[in-house]
Amino acid sequence: MNPPQLLYALALQAVPNIGDISAKKLIQHCGSPEAVFKETKANLSKIDGIGTFTIKHLEEAKHLKAAEKELSFMEKKGIEGLYFEDSNYPFKLKHCIDGPLVLFQKGDINWDHAPIISIVGTRKITTYGLAQCEKIIETLAVFNPIIVSGFAYGTDIAAHKAALKHQLQTVGCMAQGLQNTYPKAHLKYRSLIENQGGFVTDFWSTSVMDPSNFLRRNRLIAGLSEATIVIESAEKGGSLATAAMAFGYNREVFALPGRITDHQSQGCHNLIKTKNAHLISNPVDIPYILNWSLETPKKVVQKKLFVELDADEKIIFNYLKKESKSPLDGIAIACEMPTSKAAYLLLNLELKGVCRPLPGKEFELV
């Protein structure tokens, strides 16, 4: 999309009482975002649902100025704006009636020719949930999917980390402008994800963080993918809202069962019981039901070792290169750093696909 049209699309977002659905209705009637602002009052008043209040605000110059300011901010921060009619706008999301007029993204995301799976679940994920999440992504890795989640505690970050480990693209859907990180504890994962996927949102940089933002964010998680997997959920929770949205978009939903007494599996059991989700008895159920083909081999993401490693990571990398494998304590002593710091750096190296843990708290290069 050429910059002038993106500018007018942003300006349209700034107009009070115009949401994604009504904005698309206006554009369909007028031909383009720019044409909406140049249309006569008489013609605008003929559009169903567009009243005099909205028409009056379309005449105000402040909305275009706000759009210019936001566009300038995006350019400075390396944030890309995808208009819903652009060819590079995510295909599945384009077919959601309430999909964002403009999707903001940052990172290195390639939406083309890859299946997209959303993984959601409780923030209080159990060891069982963690193991199954890892097993599911490991099984799906051969199909080279993009793993989408919400970058929150628990299931979300577990899915992102497993995707990084298996060198898959992963995308975090944010409930605020992309210049912010929430939760702040996950700041250490931002650059890793931006190098192997990225982040998306439909919130402007001026948006204020509010709990209600998460429901709006969840529609992106549901709408981007062809299927949503619920790992664990209590009887009530945000992941169930995401599953309901995915079901409403006519997408497949999968739920991982637990024991009937497990509190964190009650939501999944209810989804299965009401036939709103497929039961996952084995991770291979997912590609089978989705009818995925293995004709296209997995695309391996090339490691950019010396680009991504910082000075301390290089010290550990060079030590393991020389020693083949070593326990955590041995690495810390040899590299002259606290064990806690060595453990943190080894986690980063593992997420970058450089090293892997072995039994007995040993580590080796991949």
Image (tube, rainbow, N blue to C red):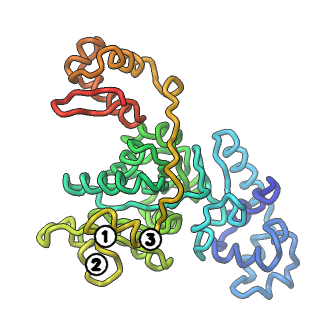
**Direction from residue 4 to residue 125 in the image, left or right:** left
Of label 1 and label 3, which has the lower sequence position?
1
Q: Residue furthest front?
A: 295
Which residue does the image show at 31% across and 70% down from the upper left? 255
**Direction from residue 73 to residue 214 in the image, left or right:** left
Image-quadrant location for residue 355: top left
Q: Give yes or no for contact between labels 1 and 3 (Cβ–Cβ under 8 Å).
A: no
Q: Which residue is mark 1?
A: 255
Query: Is residue 238 among the parts visible in the rendering?
Result: no
> Distance between the Cα atoms at labels 2 and 1?
7 Å
Q: Nearer the viewer, residue 43 or 341?
A: 341
Q: Amino acid at mark 3?
A: Leu
User: Mark 1 against mark 3, which lies toward the viewer?
Assistant: 3
Q: Which residue is mark 3?
A: 290
Above or below 169: residue 97: below
Which residue does the image show at 37% across and 45% down from the upper left? 161
> Distance between the Cα atoms at labels 3 and 2?
17 Å
Q: Nearer the viewer, residue 336 or 138?
A: 138
Say which element carries label 1: strand
| Residue 54, x across and y down, in percent | 72, 76
Q: Which residue is mark 2?
A: 272
Q: Amino acid at mark 1?
A: Ala
| Residue 290, x across and y down, in percent | 44, 71
Quadrant for the C terminus, please: top left
Q: Residue furthest left?
A: 261
| Residue 167, x across and y down, in percent | 45, 43
Q: Nearer the viewer, residue 106 or 180?
A: 106
Which residue does the image show at 72% across and 82% down from the upper left? 50
| Residue 67, x across and y down, in percent | 73, 55
Image-quadrant location for residue 284: bottom left
